[in-house]
Image (spheres, grey):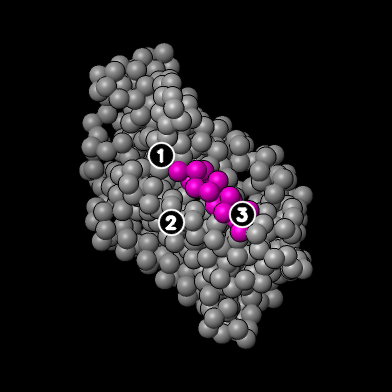
Amino acid sequence: MTTNLDPVALAVFTFFFALVTVMGFIASRWRAPKTMGHLDEWGLGGRSFGAWITWFLVGGDFYTAYTVIAVPALVYAVGAYGFFALPYTIIVYPFVFMVMPLLWKRAKANGYVTAGDVVYGQYSSRALELAVAITGVIATMPYIALQLVGMAAVLKALGLTGELPLAVAFIILALYTYSAGLRAPALIAFVKDIMIYIAVFAAIAIIPSKLGGYGNVFAAADAAFQAKGTGSLLLGGNQYVAYASLALGSALAAFMYPHTLTGIFASNSANTIRKNAVFLPAYTLLLGLLALLGYMGHAANLNISSPNQVVPALFQTLFPSWFTGFAFAAIAIGALVPAAVMSIGASNLFTRNFWKAYINPNVTHEGEAKVAKITSLIVKIGALMVIAFLPTQFALDLQLLGGIWILQTLPALVFSLYCNWFRAEGLLAGWLVGFLSGTYLVWINGLKPLQPISLGGAPFTVYIGLLVLLANIAVAVLITAVMPRRNALAT
C-alpha cells in the first residue's frame, strides 16, 4: 500500500468530508424543536425518527468504519472463520423484533433515556443501575477509539500522516455533535450509507474482473492460507462451536450497547422498530460482500504490513484516484456517524445514571442537556487520546472485553420485560460474576475471547461472553429463588 500524497483522491475526499461537516452543523435546524435544552431532544432527537431515518441511523452506528476495515482484514487473515459476522447480524434481528419494541414502550411511557433508567425504574436499585451504566460507558469507549482506527487507515493511505488530521476530523465531529445532538449523525447517515453501498457494490463488481474472476480469487486465497499454514476457505471441525457461539453471543450483545439502544429509543413507535428489524438485514448482504474483499486481497498480491490495510490497498491499486478518494471518504464518514452516536449514548448514561443520581438529583432538563453535551466532548477527547498515546492493540483488546462485559447487562435489562420474578440482588450478583469471570477468562487465554472446554471427549472452544452469561443467569436465578419474596416493583 502506498502512502504518497494523491492530490486527486485527497480533493475528492475533502469535498465529501466538507459536505457532511456542513450537514452536521445545519442538522440542529433539521426538524428543529422549540429547544435543544432537553435530553429527549439533544440525546434522542425528540424520539421522533420514523422508519427511514431509523434504518439509516441504526445501520450507520451498527455497521461502522471499523467494520468496513476489520471484517475484510479478519477474512484476509483467517479465512472462513472471519465470516462469523454474517450469522451474527442475521440472528440479531429476530431478537430486535421481539424484544426492542417492548423496551421502547417502557422507555417512552416513563421518559427513560438509557438502559440504566430502565433498570432503576424496574428494580429501584441504585447499585444495579450504576453497574449497568458503568458497563455501558466502559464498553463504549474503546468502540469509539476503533472508529478512529478505521479513519486513520484511510488517512494514512491518502498520505496524511501524524495525529493532526485525525484530531482535526474529530474536533469537527465534536463541535457539530455538541450543537445538533443525535440529529447530526442521523442526517449524515443518509450520505454515509449511500456512499458505502456505492463503494462496496463497485468493488465486488469490478475487482474480481481485474483479478481473473471469483474462481481465481478463491484459488489465490486458498493457496495463501495453505502456504502460511493458518486459515482456510472452510471452517475446520474444531471451529464449529466457537463460530456458532461467537455469532450467538455477539448477536445478543449487539443491542445492549448504549449507541444501538439510543437508536432504538429515538424511534417514534414500536412499529418503526419492527419494520427496521425486517429491513435492516439488507446491511448483512452488504457485509457479506464486503467480507469477500479479504479474499480479493490475496488475489491482488497486495504489499501490506497489516491486514487492516487490505481495503485501502485494494482501492488504491485497482481504482482510479477519484474513486479511491470517494471510497476513502465513505469509510471516514462511516467513522463519524457511529462515533457521534456512541459518544451521545455514553454521555446520556453519565448524565442520567451518575450526575442526576448522585451529584444533582434536582438538575433541570436544561441542566441535563448541558452536562450531556460537555460529557460527549470529554468522551471523544478520551477516545482520541487512546489512539494517540496507547498502542492500537490496547483498544482492540478492550473492545473484545467490551462485548463480553456489555452482554452481562442483558438479564437486568431484558428479563423484566417478560416477568417480575427476578430480584435486584440476584441480578447484581449475576452481573458481578459474569463481569469478573469473563475478564479473568479473557486474561488467562491471552486476551482472546474463546475458552477451551473438554467434556470427556475432544476439546472445543466456546465464546467466553456466552459462557459467563450462563453463569450470570444461574447466579441470578439461584439468589432470587432463595431470597424471601416481596411485592414486585415493576412499573
Query: Whole-Å distance between the Cαs marked 3 and 2?
Result: 18 Å
Which numbered marker is on residue 450?
1
Instruction: Give the amino acid type for the residue marked by disc 2 in the picture.
Output: Leu
The answer to which quarter of the image holds residue 351 is bottom right
Quadrant occupied by the N terminus: top left
Identify the residue at horizontal 53%, vertical 75% (top origin): 354
Tally the marks: 3
Identify the residue at horizontal 58%, vertical 82% (top origin): 367
- Queried whether the magenta region covers residue 475, the answer comes back as yes
User: Start and end of the magenta stretch?
Assistant: 464-479
- Whether residue 72 is situated above or below residue 134 in the rendered picture: above
Q: Position of residue 270 (x, y in %)?
A: 75, 53
255 or 319: which is nearer to us? 255
- Whether residue 304 is situated above or below residue 141 in the rendered picture: above
Which numbered marker is on residue 436?
2
Instruction: Give the amino acid type for the residue marked by disc 3 in the picture.
Output: Leu
The residue tagged 3 is 478
**Main SS of residues in magenta:** helix
Sequence-wise, the earlier of marks 3 and 1 is 1
Q: Nearer the viewer, mark 3 or mark 1?
A: 3
Q: Position of residue 239 (x, y in %)?
A: 43, 27
Identify the residue at horizontal 52%, vertical 65% (top origin): 131
Q: Secondary structure at mark 3?
A: helix
Q: Nearer the viewer, mark 3 or mark 2?
A: 3
Q: Position of residue 272 (x, y in %)?
A: 73, 50
Q: Nearer the viewer, mark 2 or mark 1?
A: 2
* Marks 2,1: beta carbons within 8 A: no
